[in-house]
Every structure is written in structure tokens, then in C-alpha cells.
Image (tube, rainbow, N blue to C red):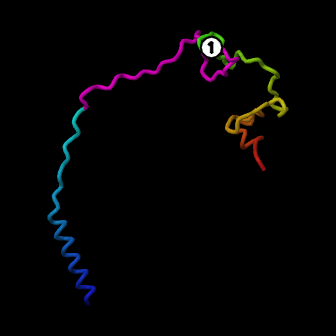
């Protein structure tokens, strides 16, 4: 009986509070006082000797033309034979498997256990 009286009182107070709620609108944020500069993607010219993803050759000054070798300039020790895993060298776990299956190396030949 006392619990029901308390619940009824609580319902009345909540309904009274909800009846008096006023929704206030926020003003939109003020515009920025300055415009941001236009950003542009920049790449080195193709003949600059820098190739994206290339390996660093011998330690030479960064301003020399031979500081970075592209993958096409690297010496090839042995051709990769899909049938012979000994010719694959070091393969990254998420790289495509050199056997030509189309799967990742970690799922195909790099599976552990």
C-alpha cells in the first residue's frame, strides 16, 4: 500500500516536470573568421630519382640521384618460381602468395600449425 502510494506520487512529479519542460534552441556556431587554405597533393617529378615504395640503396647523400632505387632498378638474384618455395625469399604475411593461388601468403603457404 505504501509502495503504491510512493509510485503514484513519483508518476505525478515526473509528469509535472515533463509538462514544464521548455526546449531551447541553440544558435548556430559563428562562421570561422578566416578561410582554411586549399590543400593539394604533391608528388616529386618522375625523373627526380625518387620512386614511391623504392628501397634505399647504399647510404648516399639524400640529394644525390642514386639515393633511392626503385623496384625496377634492384638487382634480381634469381627469378621467382611458383613451384619452388626456395626461390620466394622473404614474403610478407599479408602479401599475395607467390604460388599463384590468389590467397594471402598467411592463408596459403605461410600457414602456421
Q: Residues within 10 Å of mark 1 (few under 14, many from 20)?
A: few
- Quadrant of residue 54 in the image? top right
Tell me which residue sits at (54%, 12%) in the image. Answer: 45
Residue drawn at x 64%, y 15% as measured from the top left: 67
Q: Quadrant of residue 79?
A: top right
Q: Position of residue 47 (x, y in %)?
A: 59, 9
Q: In the figure, 32 relative to 38: above or below?
A: below
Q: Does residue 40 show up magenta in the picture?
A: yes
Task: Give the residue at x 23% y 33%.
Answer: 31
Q: Which residue is the extreme one toward the bottom?
A: 1
Task: Quickly name the residue at label 1.
Answer: 61
Q: Give the magenta range.
A: 32-61
Image point (24%, 82%), residue name: 6
Query: Main SS type for the magenta part?
Result: loop
- Coordinates of residue 97 in the picture (x, y in percent): 73, 35
Image quadrant for the N terminus? bottom left
Give the side of residue 104 with respect to residue 1, left or right.
right
Residue 68, picture quadrant? top right
In the drawing, does residue 42 fall left or right of residue 3?
A: right
Considering only vertical position in the picture, is 103 above or below 48?
A: below
Q: Nearer the viewer, residue 83 or 22?
A: 22
Q: Position of residue 22 (x, y in %)?
A: 15, 58
- Of 86 and 66, nearer the camera is 66
Q: Secondary structure at mark 1?
A: loop
Amino acid at each position: 500500500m505504501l509502495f503504491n502510494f510512493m509510485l503514484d506520487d513519483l508518476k505525478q512529479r515526473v509528469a509535472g516536470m515533463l509538462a514544464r519542460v521548455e526546449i531551447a534552441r541553440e544558435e548556430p556556431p559563428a562562421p570561422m573568421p578566416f578561410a582554411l587554405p586549399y590543400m593539394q597533393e604533391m608528388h616529386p617529378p618522375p625523373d627526380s630519382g625518387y620512386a614511391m615504395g623504392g628501397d634505399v640503396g647504399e647510404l648516399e647523400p639524400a640529394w644525390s640521384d642514386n639515393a633511392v632505387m626503385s623496384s625496377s632498378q634492384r638487382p634480381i638474384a634469381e627469378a621467382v618460381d611458383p613451384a619452388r618455395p626456395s626461390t620466394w625469399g622473404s614474403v610478407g604475411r599479408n602479401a599475395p602468395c607467390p604460388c599463384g593461388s590468389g590467397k594471402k601468403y598467411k592463408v596459403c603457404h605461410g600457414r602456421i600449425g
